[in-house]
Image (cartoon, rainbow, N blue to C red):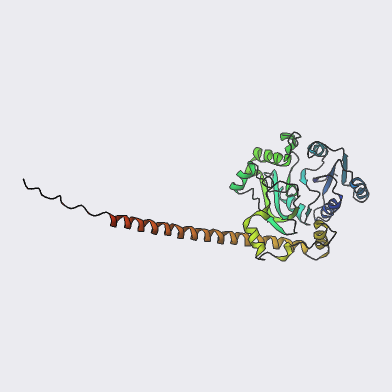
Amino acid sequence: MMPHLSILLPTHNRCDTLAVAVKSLLAQSFQDWELLVVGDGCSDGTADWIEALQQRHPRVRWFDLPKGPGFGYANRNTALRQARGELIGFMADDDLVLDEHLARQVALMRDPAVQLGAVGSLSVNSDGVMVPTVGPLHDEGYYTAFMAGDNRLPAATVIHRRAVFDELGLWSETLPRRADLDMWQRIIGRWGRVGIGRDPRCSCVHFRAPWKLKGVHPDPHDFVIWQELLAEGRLDPALQIVVPSGVTPQAALWQRLSSEPDAGRKLERAALKALETYAYATMQSLSELHRAFGQQLERFAAVDAARQAAEDRLVEPMGEPPTVDA
C-alpha cells in the first residue's frame, strides 16, 4: 500500500544529529509515511547507520548519492521523482519535531483547496534558548514579504501536494541556494492565498545552522523585543535547553521530550505563552514610543511658540508718520 506522505530529508555528514531527527519522526502519532533520506556525498558513517535502521524500518528509503553541486538540489530531485506519497513533507537533518507535527500538517491538507500548508516552529540559538518563529502566511503583510524572498519558514514546517510537481516541475537545479523557497513561491503564485493552510502551533524545533547568513535567514533571536524578554527572564523555563558537556542540543532536547511525561505539550504551551508575552511587550513598547513621540511634539510646539513670542516682542508697532509743516 502506498504511503500517504513522503518526507524528504537531505543530509551531508551529520550522522550525530540525523539520528535525533529520524527518532522524532518515528515517534509521530501519524504513521502513514515514508522517509526519503538523501545522502549528498556522505562519508561519515551515515550510510551504515541508515542501512541498519532500514532493517527495522523498511519505509526508510536511502539514496546514497555522490556530492552534488551546491546544496545538492539535483540529488533531492532524484528522490522526489520516486516519492510515492500523495503529500510531500520535509525534514532537516539537524531539526526535530514534536509528536503531533505530521498529524497537524496532514490535517491542513484535508481541505481540497489547500495546496501548501505550514505549521509553527521554535528557533534555537547557540545558548539553547527557543523562541517562536513568526511567519503567518495568512497575513497580507508577511505574504507579500514572503513572495519577495523573506522566508521565515524552516523546511520541516512545510507540506504540499505531490501533484504540484506535475504542473510546476521539481526544484530548480540551477539556483545557488533557496530552491525550496523558489518551489514554495511557485506553488503559492499559482494557487494564491486561498491555497495556503496554516496551523500556528509550534510543533517543529529548528536548530539554526551557524553558516546561515544573517539577513538571508532571519533569526528571531536578533529581534529587540525577544532580547529584552530574555534579559528580563520573562519566558517560560521550558524554552531553555540544558545541554550537558559532550552532548548535542538536539540530543539534550530529545532526552527531555522522550522521557518526561507531556514534555511536548508543555513546550507548545510555553511557545504560546511566549507569543502572547511578545505581543504584549510589542504593544507596550509601541505605546511608550507613541507617548514619547507625542511629548517630543509638545516640546517642539512649546519651543516654537516661545520663539514666535520673542520675535513678536522685538517688532515695534509702526505709528503714524510725523506731520511736516509746509
Q: Is residue 158 found left or right of 284 in the rendered image?
A: right
**x, y (%) of residue 241?**
77, 61
Q: In the picture shown, does residue 17 fall above or below 75?
A: below
Quadrant of the rendered structure where residue 260 is?
Answer: bottom right
**x, y (%) of residue 235?**
68, 64
Residue at x 56% of width, y 60% of height: 285
**x, y (%) of residue 186?**
68, 38
Q: Which sits in the foreground, 53 or 286?
A: 286
Q: How many marks?
A: 0
Q: Which sits in the foreground, 122 or 233?
A: 233
Residue at x 42% of width, y 57% of height: 300
Q: Which sits in the foreground, 196 or 233?
A: 233
Residue at x 73% of width, y 64% of height: 238
For the C terminus, the image quarter is top left
**x, y (%) of residue 299?**
42, 59
Quadrant of the rendered structure where residue 144 is?
Answer: top right
Residue 133 makes an appearance in the image: no
Q: In the picture shown, does residue 85 fall above or below 228?
A: above
Q: Is residue 83 found left or right of 290 in the rendered image?
A: right
For the N terminus, the image quarter is top right
Residue 72 makes an appearance in the image: yes
